[in-house]
């Protein structure tokens, strides 16, 4: 999820081309309603309505266990990822290979 | 030796001691006052010493010596009158009467070989007593006008003089009441001792007494001084110090602050004696400041003849000056003007020195506070700059993320499937993000141009109503309710691109900080040669604490969660610059939770 529609669109295109299924959302609240048992959550931190911190808290509180990879343009990407207990992070702007590798590495394998 | 004899000897001892002390004082600092004091006690001391020598060695009284001593004793009250004249004006009639009395009693005593007939002796005694009382009253009046040590000393002197007068009166009247002669003799000895003690306290007070007397004044000054460094600016501190020093000294005071860059003392002299600034010159205050030494000028007009007429016009007689310095740091100088010569210049100079030292502490702590504030402001500016750079970097990275990912994705497709049709959506996305990136770069450049005053360019007739309508109809606002109220075109001479930027920015902010379903109102009117533009939203509002800084560079209100609303905090800063460079004004009214209204006033002529 990301509040920037262009970023959502291009990531969706890339991951679909890699053969993944993608559900997108513009903010944390929308994502909480949509996400259910996904293999991986790509999470932007600065979003209106419900931001990355709020999403992560509610998401974990609801018992959902999908791995989370933080995407942020802020300098402290790594610290923020640690703060919310994310599994990994992508510092914007990221290479397309880095995106694909992060998804491959952290996504839970379908059983 | 009887008790009365002991008292008598003690009294004599004290008077001789006072004489030695005042002679020492007069030798160190020869002023009219110190010489008159020495003369007065000299008369008493010589009389005492002479009669002691005669008694001790059983000498025959030499007539000439006897006459001289008699005249000295007779002159005593007159010398007292002279002393009074030194620090308080004695009307000439009183002086003449004193002189007449002096001559009359001298003739009476010399003609009668020291024992004038009873009625004449009584007249002389009454003259002595009256003169002493008159002087005592004068001393009390002078004490009232003074403060601190001087006041206490004058009070003691007044008391001593009164006791001396009583001594003479009782001694002179004793022979008239033979049955009480013994008791009166005792009273005379005790009164004389009393006057001696009062005089030594007044004329040669020990240091411990001086310090104790100085304390209340100093304490009062310090109580006032404690809050001085917190006054809004240095000039108000200087004014307060001047007032405080003036009332402590019972004189007028002025402070010159040293400006190291120009090598000048700067004044805000409320008494108009000194110019606004003084560089190296013959001014007495500059001399004292340069020597870093407290100075006393009993006669200001004589010490600096160039200012003599000014001093006279302003009633300045004496000057007391002390440098204000903290360690090696020269801060300035304190000057006190008095309309009469200080009675005890040493004490007053001491007090001026003490006050100057206190002023130094206060001014220095103010300087330190200013330094601390400067460092803080500097750090704050550095922090803002850092915040700005990271905010700018964040904003630039957002479009860059799409650009990099999309371009690499297209590249990969082109390599893997060379025959596939062009991904038009992807290409358009690149174009869109590149434009966005370029707009951000422009915003950064605008802010830097604004700082150089080069933001507003050529002007042309612009209809604000039409311009606002174009903004409100933008595709990106199609889900928002933006109402425009205007009766007729409002045309002014503006830089079209820049004024459009202001309207866009205000509408964009209204959209950004208010709920989607709420209404945004744009109103444009013209009134007496001015265009008025209001943009009102029903959004989150701006906290009162942030209102004064909302148009400052990089400032973002406390209730703007920067994780939710990414932005550079430059928009309103640029808007304000554009409006002001058009000769207009921009301000905001806002309440948290209710919304904000931004008001812009622009002259229609558009001339700054």
Image: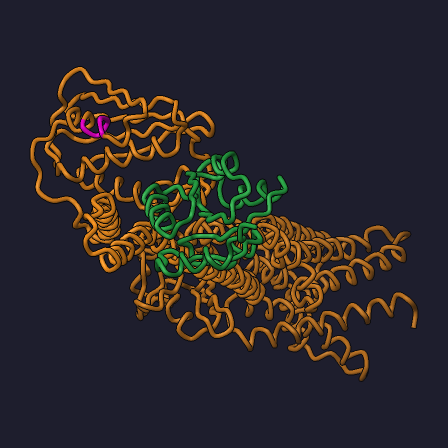
Chain colours: A green, B orange
* Residue at the limit of the structure toward the right, as seen here: B2
Total marks placed = 0
- Position of B398 with respect to B237 (left or right) is left
Q: Is residue A14 visible?
A: yes
Q: Can residue B89 be seen in this view?
A: no
- Position of B108 with respect to A38 (left or right) is right
The residue segment tinted magenta is: B470-474
- Residue found at x 43% / y 51%: B233
* Residue at the limit of the structure toward the top, as seen here: B487
Where residue B580 appears, as percent x and y from the top left, is 22, 40
- Residue found at x 74% / y 64%: B196
What secondary structure do most residues of the magenta stretch adopt?
A: helix
- Tell me the quadrant of the picture where the C terminus of chain B can be found: top left
Residue situated in front as seen by the camera: B304 or B32: B304
- Position of B185 with respect to B281 (left or right) is right
Residue B506 in the magenta stretch? The answer is no
Residue B473 in the magenta stretch? The answer is yes
Where residue B517 appears, as percent x and y from the top left, is 39, 23
Classify B483 as above or below B202. Answer: above
Where residue B165 appears, as percent x and y from the top left, is 70, 55
- Position of B502 with respect to B458 (left or right) is right
User: Toward which corner of the image does residue B598 lie, by quadrant?
Assistant: top left
Residue situated in front as seen by the camera: B173 or A107: A107
Where residue B188 appears, as percent x and y from the top left, is 81, 58
- Tell me the quadrant of the picture where the N terminus of chain B can be found: bottom right
Residue situated in front as seen by the camera: B531 or B443: B443
């Amino acid at each position: 999820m990301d509040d920037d529609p262009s970023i959502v669109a291009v990531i969706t295109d890339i991951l679909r081309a890699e053969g993944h299924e993608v559900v997108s959302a513009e903010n944390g609240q929308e994502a909480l309603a949509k996400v259910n048992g996904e293999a991986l959550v790509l999470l932007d931190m600065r979003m209106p309505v419900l931001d990355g911190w709020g999403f992560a808290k509610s998401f974990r509180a609801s018992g959902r266990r999908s791995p989370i990879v933080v995407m942020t343009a802020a300098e402290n990407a790594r610290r923020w990822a640690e703060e919310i207990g994310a599994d990994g992070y992508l510092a914007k702007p990221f290479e397309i290979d880095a995106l694909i590798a992060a998804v491959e590495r952290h996504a839970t394998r379908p059983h | 030796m009887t008790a009365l004899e002991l008292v008598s000897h003690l009294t004599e001892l004290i008077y001789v001691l006072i004489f030695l002390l005042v002679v020492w004082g007069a030798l160190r600092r020869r002023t009219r006052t110190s010489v008159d004091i020495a003369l007065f006690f000299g008369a008493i001391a010589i009389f005492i010493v002479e009669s002691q020598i005669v008694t001790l060695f059983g000498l025959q009284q030499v007539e000439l010596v006897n006459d001289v001593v008699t005249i000295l004793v007779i002159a005593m009250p007159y010398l007292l009158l002279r002393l009074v004249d030194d620090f308080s004006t004695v009307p000439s009639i009183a002086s003449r009467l004193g002189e007449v009395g002096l001559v009359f009693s001298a003739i009476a005593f010399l003609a009668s070989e020291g024992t004038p007939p009873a009625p004449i002796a009584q007249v002389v005694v009454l003259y002595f007593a009256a003169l002493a009382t008159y002087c005592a009253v004068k001393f009390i009046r002078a004490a009232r006008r003074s403060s601190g040590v001087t006041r206490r000393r004058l009070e003691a002197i007044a008391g001593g003089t009164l006791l001396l007068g009583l001594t003479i009166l009782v001694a002179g009247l004793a022979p008239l009441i033979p049955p009480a002669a013994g008791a009166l003799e005792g009273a005379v000895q005790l009164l004389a001792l009393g006057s001696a003690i009062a005089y030594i306290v007044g004329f040669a007070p020990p240091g411990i007494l001086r310090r104790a007397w100085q304390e209340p004044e100093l304490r009062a000054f310090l109580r006032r001084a404690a809050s001085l460094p917190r006054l809004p600016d240095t000039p108000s501190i200087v004014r307060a110090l001047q007032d405080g020093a003036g009332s402590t000294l019972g004189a007028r005071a002025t402070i010159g602050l040293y400006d190291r860059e120009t090598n000048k003392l700067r004044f805000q002299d409320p008494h108009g004696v000194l110019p606004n600034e003084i560089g190296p010159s013959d001014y007495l205050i500059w001399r004292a400041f340069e020597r870093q030494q407290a100075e006393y000028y009993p006669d200001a007009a004589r010490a600096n003849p160039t200012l003599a007429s000014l001093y006279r016009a302003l009633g300045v007689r004496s000057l007391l000056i002390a440098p204000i310095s903290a360690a090696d740091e020269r801060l300035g100088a304190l000057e006190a003007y008095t309309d009469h010569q200080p009675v005890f210049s040493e004490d007053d100079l001491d007090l001026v020195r003490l006050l100057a030292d206190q002023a130094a502490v206060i001014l220095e702590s103010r300087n330190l506070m200013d330094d601390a504030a400067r460092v803080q402001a500097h750090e704050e500016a550095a922090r803002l700059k850092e915040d700005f750079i990271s905010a700018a970097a964040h904003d630039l990275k957002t479009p860059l993320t799409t650009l990099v990912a999309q371009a690499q994705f297209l590249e990969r497709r082109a390599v893997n499937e060379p025959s596939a049709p062009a991904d038009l959506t992807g290409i358009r996305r690149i174009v869109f993000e590149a434009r966005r990136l370029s707009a951000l770069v422009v915003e950064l450049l605008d802010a830097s141009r604004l700082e150089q005053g080069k933001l507003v360019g050529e002007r042309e007739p612009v209809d604000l109503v039409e311009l606002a309508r174009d903004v409100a109809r933008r595709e990106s606002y199609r889900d928002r309710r933006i109402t425009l109220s205007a009766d007729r075109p409002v045309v002014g001479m503006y830089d079209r691109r820049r004024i459009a930027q202001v309207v866009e920015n205000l509408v964009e902010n209204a959209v950004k900080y208010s709920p989607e379903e709420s209404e945004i109102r744009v109103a444009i009117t013209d009134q007496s040669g001015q265009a008025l533009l209001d943009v009102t939203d029903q959004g989150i509002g701006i906290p009162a604490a942030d209102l004064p800084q909302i148009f400052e560079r990089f400032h973002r209100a406390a209730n703007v969660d920067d994780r939710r609303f990414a932005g550079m905090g430059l928009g309103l800063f640029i808007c304000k610059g554009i409006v002001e460079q058009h000769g207009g004004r921009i301000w905001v009214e806002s309440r948290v939770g209710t919304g904000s209204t931004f008001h812009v006033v622009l002259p229609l002529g558009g001339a700054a």
